[in-house]
Amino acid sequence: MKSIKNITLLLFVSLVCLSCKKFIDIKKNSDQSFLETAKDCQLLLDNYELFNTGYPIDGEISADDYYLDNARYSSDPITLEDRAIYTWQATAIRNSADLWKGPYNKIYHANLIMETVNKLNGQEAAVVLSNLRGSALFFRAYSLWNLAQLYASPYGSTSGQEQGLPIRLMSDINDIQARASVGDTYARIVQDLKEAAVLLNTTSTISSRPNKAAAYAMLARVYLSMGDYPNALTSSSSALALKSNLIDFNTLNPVSFAPFVRFNTEVIFHSTVFSQNAVLAVGYGDEDQAIIDPSVISSFENNDLRKRILFKENTDVSVPSGTYRFTGNHESAVGSSKLFNGLAVDELYLTRAECYARAGNTASAMADLNSLLATRWETGTYVNKTASTASDALAIVLAERRKGLIMRGTRWMDLRRLNLETRFAKTLSRTVNGKTYTLPANDSRYTILIPQEAITNSSLPQNRR
């Protein structure tokens, strides 16, 4: 009972402190810890609402997986802030820092757990402490990376000069950090994940807990966002060596609003984005909101079950006929904006296939892609895709990635990294009430403004415009 009371009190203190002036720094003194045992640390790590939910959503809002029709764009649930972000306004900014504070709250707790583990060295089983430290390192890196996709410039040749994020390595409020460079931000993320991969257990009892496969899968995603394709290849292979289960879509119910169960066999690590936002609420048949980009819908071939599993045709009479909503969420919150953004096996196959293609290994790229797609087609109908060159293979893989990972929290990352290549650069466009808004490739608006509350209550410099 003491451990449970300690954890409850710790979470209460952290929630109260989220509203304090120095909101990044949650404790006044790192010695004031309610964590006393390894069990305390594991109880805190198992707090699903703290560590597995609430990741930033504005990248998904800004991406091109969906659109809002005029009526929904102008409706009451959609705030002025949401509309500005949706249309990529240069001045678009959140007043509240919830999307900033949430991940830093996770980082704070991760640091607190690591400090406790250090104190327990020699007092608890080494394997237990190693997994606790590995878990904390994973969550610190996972949170920092998710922040970086919004508030730091895309990783590139000038990353040493571009402003990244404050890197919090201690829970003490006196450890004030300025914005590190983009390069240093990613270096810390990679370092934490590499150490986590060594320390974490090979398996976990539930996918809300990280394990070695999750650390390698996240490394693959991070390296992909950095354009480091050789290391993304190595990491995705390491993850697939530990977990490679794929769901046969023929076993799913295509008419269900929720074809996937939470923690299904493809999920390696489960997390969701911040859910309190009307823009990305995908709705039901009679209350449709986010409408899937029609170019994505039309790209699916005959007998590809993904069109029926991942999407449903809208039935609301106020929505144009022939439009679709998303029903492929790996999360139990049907119809809401609580979208899965975690790590899964299908993403690994797509990542490794892309990296093989970039390395000139056409055969391996297509083998990985075909292994994945064969599980997505009606039984007996799939014909292996072929490519005559590595360049052709890359184009095919990226097209399948676009379809297979829709509304999964990776599209904004993909746009940011692929825009650096002329061949794949894309100008985004949205038309609302007769006015067209565009976002050219590599525009400064691909780095979202830090919320005003964070700027007001700190000395952090704002992102450039």
Image (cartoon, rainbow, N blue to C red):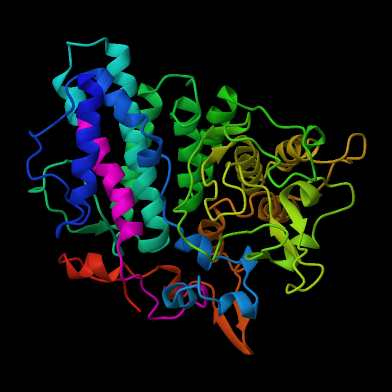
In the shown orientation, is residue 108 left or right of residue 90?
Answer: left
Q: Residue at x 34, y 21 (%)?
A: 131
The vertical placement of 461 against 243, above or below, is below
Q: Position of residue 99 (x, y in %)?
A: 36, 58
**Above or below: residue 363 compared with residue 44:** below
Quadrant for the N terminus, please. top left
Span highlighted in magenta in the image: 85-114
Q: Position of residue 29 (x, y in %)?
A: 7, 41
Q: Nearer the viewer, residue 303 or 251?
A: 251
Quarter of image, res 374: top right
Q: Quadrant of residue 148?
A: bottom left
Q: Nearer the viewer, residue 307 or 333?
A: 333
326 in the magenta segment: no
Depth check, front residue: 330 or 383 = 330
Q: What is the x, y in percent for residue 37?
A: 20, 19
Q: Can you tell which quarter of the image residue 441 is in?
A: bottom right
Residue occupying image coordinates x 41% and y 51%:
146
Q: Residue at x 47, y 21 (%)?
A: 204
